Image (cartoon, grey):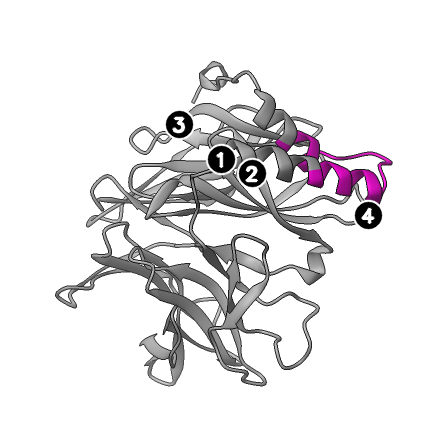
Amino acid sequence: MRAHSLKHKSITVGVSAAVIALAACGNQGTARAANAHHQISAVDVRAVAGVLPPASFVGLTPPHSPPSAAGRLALYSTANGKRLRFLTAQEPGHGAFNPVVSPDGRTVAFERSTGSCAQTIDAVPIDGGRARVLIPMQFSGNRPILPSSPAYSADGRYFAYLTTGCSVSSHDVIHVRNLHTGRELTGHGYLPERSIFVNDNRRLVFVDGGALVVVRIPSFARHTVRPPRGCQYVLLAGTETKLVATVDCGRRHALSIVAISPSTFTMTRTLFRLSRCPTCTDISIAAADPSAMLVATDNPCVSVPGAIYVIRGQTARLVRSGSAQKLPYEIVW
């Protein structure tokens, strides 16, 4: 990847409003940040009138939740970020992590910790109902083998996940299950959270060590695609036909959201510059509507740093802002 392949776009009024809110920095106080949030909300609601994103998203309850809500998955409104309902029951000592939404929007798969060195991948209907174990914990002799890192293909045909043992000497194994036939392909290798199927489900791509890693299916051979010099990839989101990533560049750690080619896995253009202060904690694209991104930022330069946005094209609309400790996290749609 050559640095000159990163192309920067001119910023229109919609993007400028987004940058005001996303890049509020320095000694700006809460009032000024809130005013910027108000401006972006007003501008972008008008700009995207008649074009609606998914009505809800899934996330983990905020870190500073009361005991009755802690560690649970919930459904939140895209309009204002308010919780609509819980998706998982209260289970003391257990916790939900890394949710992913099925392409038809009906099911949420997630990791469920059930104790020390005990974990399953469960699934719960997004419209309500009991969670069930999708991928159970296995054993090799008396050694537990834990599943993690669930991922759906955009057509809903395949489901990928990782299994690994609790000991440091255990081997990671990638699984790709055909949900229509139940057959699985397996291969040695690491698979982190939020991997994405591309190229007619013949590749899995994810961020690891600041670079993009592409795994071929069914050989499970992998190759690494480096970012431009001085940059590193942080997060990746997307579907079969659209990939976006957050990238951190330079000594000032300027953060941007960039488009990635799903065929060459190189940067094609910069979508948003988030400046050096905000950190992008979550980014998600819905398979049903890849034109919209759900983005969460955590800005350490303002008094009320947390915010959730919907970004479509060159407009960004504030969903909810406040302390990052009081906002849902690991958000997806």
Q: In this view, does 294 lie to the left or right of 13?
A: left
CB contact under 8 Å: marks 1 and 2? yes
- Distance CA(mark 2)–CA(mark 4): 25 Å
- Please tell me in which quadrant of the rendered image residue 69 appears: bottom right
SS at mark 2?
A: helix
Residue beneath label 1, please? 48
Q: How crowded is mark 2: few (under 14 residues within 10 Å), some or many (20 or more)?
A: some
* Three-letter amino acid code at the position of disc 3: Thr
SS at mark 1?
A: loop
Q: How crowded is mark 1: few (under 14 residues within 10 Å), some or many (20 or more)?
A: some
CB contact under 8 Å: marks 3 and 4? no
Residue at 66%, 36% in the rendered image: 22
Give x and y (percent) for residue 78. Answer: 52, 53
Asked if residue 320 is positioned above or below residue 7 in the image, the reply reads: below
SS at mark 4?
A: loop
Q: Does the magenta stretch include residue 31?
A: yes
Which region of the structure is painted magenta? 18-38
Q: In this view, does 155 lie to the left or right of 254?
A: left
Residue beneath label 2, please? 45
Along the polypeptide, which appears first: circle 3 or circle 1?
1
